[in-house]
Image (spheres, rainbow, N blue to C red):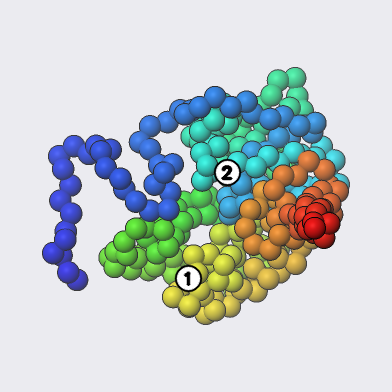
Amino acid sequence: MDNSSAYTPPKIWSDTKEHGGRFASINRPVAGPTHEKTRPVGRHPLQLYSLGTPNGVKVTVMLEELLAAGHSGAEYDAWLIRISEGDQFGSGFVSVNPNSKIPALMDHSGQAPIRVFESGAILIYLAEKFGAFLPADSARRAECLSWLFWQMGSAPFLGGGFGHFYAYAPTKIEYAIDRYAMEVKRQLDVLDRHLAQSPYLAGDEYTIADMAVWPWYGALVKGLLYEAGEFLQVQAYTHVLRWTDQIAQRPAVRRGRMVNRVSGEPSSQLHERHDAGDFDTRTQDKLAAPLESATHTRHSRAP
């Protein structure tokens, strides 16, 4: 390995230069809001502020699963937070999550609003509120929570570690990519060995543990994260693939994956969700159709 350009850290770090990378424009070493922006509030008890990243998908899948299971109190408004534009630093969002990360949830169903931030905390809060997708039996509950927190501890190595250095960093650093690729493959092997013996992460029952792990590691083994499928040889993890495909077939999962999504096929993008009917009428392909029709009409009438 060539160390000719080795970096020697200064005695005291300071934010005095352009760091580069995909998210350089929004990264900063301090917290708090950068601008005033009122947080929108819709008509449903649950107000979600999010983006269709893996962490955001965890919560929208949970909400759609709750609704599919008949929990009408789980109706929600999902507001789009465009993190690349700094929406997470608006004063309204920061009042819900002082850490300025999506997703964030406000529950207006009680006498006083309750804020919940961090995706794992939101999943547990909703599971306990509605008595669903978190086993009541002590042993099975412990297994579910163990895998949930496995994801919370492991995903930063996948996203902030491997994903950053493999896909987003301004320069390719061999040591960093190798270090995190090794860890991600170890994590996939942990999952694969476990799922060889169990249909779901906590046993025979689909739980919030599956909802937490699937958007990250399910997308990874399908080659949908960081364009790294071949590099990591994800097809080797056959039991993770079986589990991934099984969960992907659930209608609520398909809907949850669409909410606050801003990439992919227009028909798969529901930027904001305020009603169950929005899946049929408010996806980007449906919203674009009248505009395209109007444009065509104007052009056809032009002299």
Tag nearer the camera, 2 or 1? 2
Q: Is residue 53 left or right of residue 287?
A: left
Residue 239 falls in image quadrant = bottom right
Q: Looking at the image, is 270 positioned above or below residue 199? A: above
10 Å neighbourhood of mark 1: few (<14), some, or many (≥20)? Answer: some
In what quadrant of the picture does the N terminus appear?
A: bottom left
The image position of residue 2, as x and y in percent, is 17, 69
What residue is disc 1 on? 228
In what quadrant of the picture does the C terminus appear?
A: bottom right
Q: Is residue 233 left or right of residue 139?
A: left
Q: Looking at the image, is 244 positioned above or below residue 107? A: below
Q: Looking at the image, is 18 positioned above or below residue 242? A: above
Q: Element under label 1?
A: loop
The residue lying at 56 percent from left, 59 percent from top is 216
The residue lying at 58 percent from left, 43 percent from top is 82
Q: Amino acid at mark 2?
A: Arg
Residue 58 in sight here: no
The residue lying at 58 percent from left, 27 percent from top is 37
The image position of residue 103, as x and y in percent, is 59, 42
Mark 2 to mark 1 CA distance (whole Å)? 24 Å
| Residue situated in front as seen by the camera: 266 or 243 | 266
Q: Looking at the image, is 170 positioned above or below residue 107? A: below
Q: Amino acid at mark 1?
A: Ala
What residue is disc 2 on? 82
Query: From this viewpoint, which residue is outermost toward the top?
Result: 111
The image position of residue 35, as x and y in percent, is 50, 27
| Residue situated in front as seen by the camera: 212 or 201 | 212
Q: Earlier in the sequence, mark 2 or mark 1?
A: 2
Residue 251 falls in image quadrant = bottom right
Q: Element under label 2?
A: loop
The residue lying at 36 percent from left, 58 percent from top is 169
